[in-house]
Amino acid sequence: MGKGVAVIGGGIAGVQAALDLAEQGIHVYIIEKSPSLGGRMAQLDKTFPTNDCSMCILSPKLVEAGRHPNIELLTLSEIEELQGEEGEFKVKVLKSARYVDEESCTGCGICAATCPVKYEYQIPEKESVREKIEENELTKIDTILKKYEDEVGVLISILQDINEEFNYLPENALRYVSEKLGIPLSQIYHVATFYTAFSLTPRGEHIVKVCQGTACHVRGTRAVLDEITRILDVKPGETTEDLQYTLETVNCLGACALGPVMVLDKEYHGNMSPSKVKKILKSELEEGGL
Amino acid sequence: MKKISSLEELEKLRERISSSKGGKKTKVLISTKATCCQLQKSEQVTSALFDEIEKNGQKDKVEILTTGCLGFCELEPIIVIKPKGILYKNIKVDDVSDIVAKTILKGEIIEKLLYVNPLDEQRIELEDDIPFYSKQNRILLGNNSNIDPDKIEDYIASGGYSALSKVLSGMKPDEIIEEIKKSGLRGRGGAGFPTGRKWESCRNTEAEDDIKYVICNADEGDPGAYMDRNLLESNPHSVLEGMIIGAYSIGSHNGYIYVRNEYELAVSTLKNAIKQAREYGFLGKDILGSGFDFTIKLSRGGGAFVCGESTALMASIEGKPGEPRAKHIHTTTKGLWDRPTNLNNVETWANVPLIINSGADWYSKIGMDKSKGTKIFSLVGKIHNTGLVEVPMGTTLRDIIFKIGGGIPGERKFKAVQTGGPSGGCIPEHLLDLPVDYEKLTEAGSMMGSGGMIVMDDRTCMVDVARYFTNFLKDESCGKCVPCRNGLIQLHHMLTDICEGRGSEKDLDFFEELGFWITNGSLCQLGTTAVNPVQTTLRYFKDEYLTHIVDKKCPAGVCKALITFTIDSEKCTGCEVCKKNCPQDAISGEKKEVHDIDQDKCIKCGICEDSCKFDAVEVN
């Protein structure tokens, strides 16, 4: 192989990089493991955030990369060895056999159409998550699912109930809900991570909530939060290592007359100040035997 | 309870409930069924009151009404003794036996439980004489004191569901919409779109399979605003009645209430109210024998501020992440599940029965040219009389803050009032005579919003407030539009730099440019109004920004990196309280000698200032 630039991976980033380099007169090798260029983007329907059609952006670039005189495609190829340093790399590439003479092939597709052997793509049998969940927990989830059986648009309500029951959203519970409702797991995660009400990690036995409403803010909730952070040694959203306390912030509890407000489990404490935090939490921590 | 199947039956029931209530001379109201009173242990006080009345054998003579919020949250739990209307504040369990023995039995006044007017230190005996109440026009909130929110009978007895009955007994849907249009009612969620016009366009849109939705937006996300929570907790049926009337005129049979899950009490009160309304036949099939069907479902929010936006809210009801969409097609054409949908705020719905009952002419006489009726504000922050305030549109800020609110506590100076939540702005002292209506607030760079009114004094740092709102919005941005998602992060970054003494004057110019892109490059109101807090504080309090940037000082004593705590040797008595409380052991000094703070050890937590009884700790 001659001198030039090797671009590893023929996805959209690789293709664009190769095109930019090739335009500058540099000889480029695109080394791609799979039989064709395009990568992940070729599998997408739309792209974020404009919702433009993905292939409409990608395919002209693929065609261009395929016919550019300065670009050499090495598909079905993997890097075996990489040596050297900047400006002087030596790359050893293993090219798998394609059993087609690439020089002569016009890409007409007749061979594929006439081939008598059909390869059926095997979808691996998906293992149900059911076995991985304990019996009593399964009953709990089933009861929740049953509650919303004939309704539509209930995903959020179901997740709220599970979150309340388990104090967070266990991964297996989400997988189970996905199986039962036929909603892709990715969509469930989209919802679960979007709303602040859900937690994907186990929360502590006690929840300390600090209101961050404007009224509480001007009355000094920051100092209150700082003091709690200092005493419990966790940041907002985190749980102490012994799983005793989770510190959470909440946008507004609507108890503005009493701000700053702190809620320890379900008990509200109004007109908080750093020294009051110390008193309440210290006695709490001592009682808890920590 | 038997279902009511005709309008006559409703009137008979109303008479029956009213007559069964008569006879008792004394009526005691105790605010106990709202979150803010429950925080102040109102439930214990209430059960003590019941016990005490029973013990004194007054059960047949005294009626106890457990109401929702009476508005004056600072004084909760409140007891009002009628017929005279004596108001006692901040009642503790121990006070109850005295109240029964002295006031209820003998008519004596207990001085120490009376409200003290902060302006002249005078004790005021009667509810009606307290300026906080007497200067308001409580057409929506006033009914709270006649109702136990858990009892639909109380609502019926106080004239509830008579608007529905009037509508069903002969008003045509178009007539109702005309009446609402004539009243001049505008959306109370903040944007102020004329309610009647919204209903009309939803009514006129043809739905393929004849399904239309009405939604009540109870996702009260603005921090510092809680009037919707209050209405739902204290008078839920007024909202339901408004929705039924709205649905009838629009031609919808399905309603949703989207309520914040953080409002636990509001959720349970609403559930109960919907159940009762169904039992009585105000919801369900063939309402009051009119042939009209309507049901309401409750949908609990997941704690995302952006879900207060109509399209995001509808996505959330559908069980999706609450991301807004572009509104080239209005939700009245394609809303929830792509059907015509009419969404209004809690307070808007609660206004509807009033307008139907008393007429558009009466309603449109209250308020200003373009903004009619009253508006509830939650008056909070650095103010004497914290609570919910209902005033006619066009009341000046000065009247609200000083006449009703009683001014700023602790002899501090008024600095600004923040309206409109995170999308609003801070209004300075020289604009205090601004009449509060939709247009005037927008001109001043702020907005009406849902009605939060946060008062700030000279110990509030305006740069810090701007940073606070930007931080809030950056966390709540759903992330769909890049200018909002990334722009706000940058804006917050720069504001933090200023608060921590790393800002430069160039930042201020860049705010403008960044603000332009965030405003113009975002789909929903969250993004388009996100820079309001920064822009108004910069417009009215530029000096304060410059003091942070040039002098590296925070005049309000808030920004930690720019302040130091010191002890005033004149005032310090050497009591050692601060020394004992300091978590860093940064304070030295023997007993009865002036203490000193080691600045290297100090983490500026403020505990010393907070614990000093002699105001000896100073913030510089």
Image (spheres, rainbow, N blue to C red):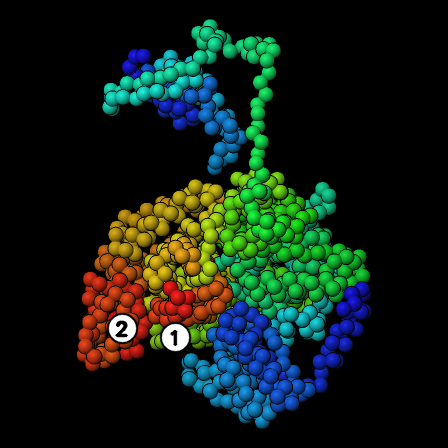
Give residue B471's position: percent from left, percent from top: 39, 53
- The lab-note entry on whether marks 1 and 2 share a chain reads yes
Who's the residue at 48% across and 68% down the image? A267
Q: Nearer the viewer, residue B100 or B449?
A: B100
Query: Do the residues bearing badges 1 and 2 touch, measured as CB atoms within 8 Å?
Result: no
Tag 1 residue: B409
- The C terminus of chain B, quarter of image: bottom left
- The chain containing the residue under callout 2 comes to B
- The N terminus of chain B, quarter of image: bottom right
Q: Mark 1 belongs to which amino acid?
A: Pro
- The chain containing the residue under callout 1 comes to B
Which residue extends farthest bottom? B106
Judge whether A110 appears above or below A46 on screen.
Answer: above
- Quick one: SS at disc 1? helix
Q: Nearer the viewer, residue B434 or B357?
A: B357
Who's the residue at 57% across and 42% down the image? A131
Q: Mark 2 belongs to which amino acid?
A: Lys
Of callouts 1 and 2, the N-terminal one: 1
**Given this view, does label 1 or label 2 mark the residue nearer the observer?**
2
Local crowd at mark 1 within 10 Å, few (<14), some, or many (≥20)?
A: some
Who's the residue at 60% across and 72% down the image? B144
Q: Is residue B146 left or right of residue B409?
A: right
Give residue B499's position: percent from left, percent from top: 30, 56
Does the rendering let one see residue A289?
yes
Disc number placed over residue B580 in the picture, else none: 2
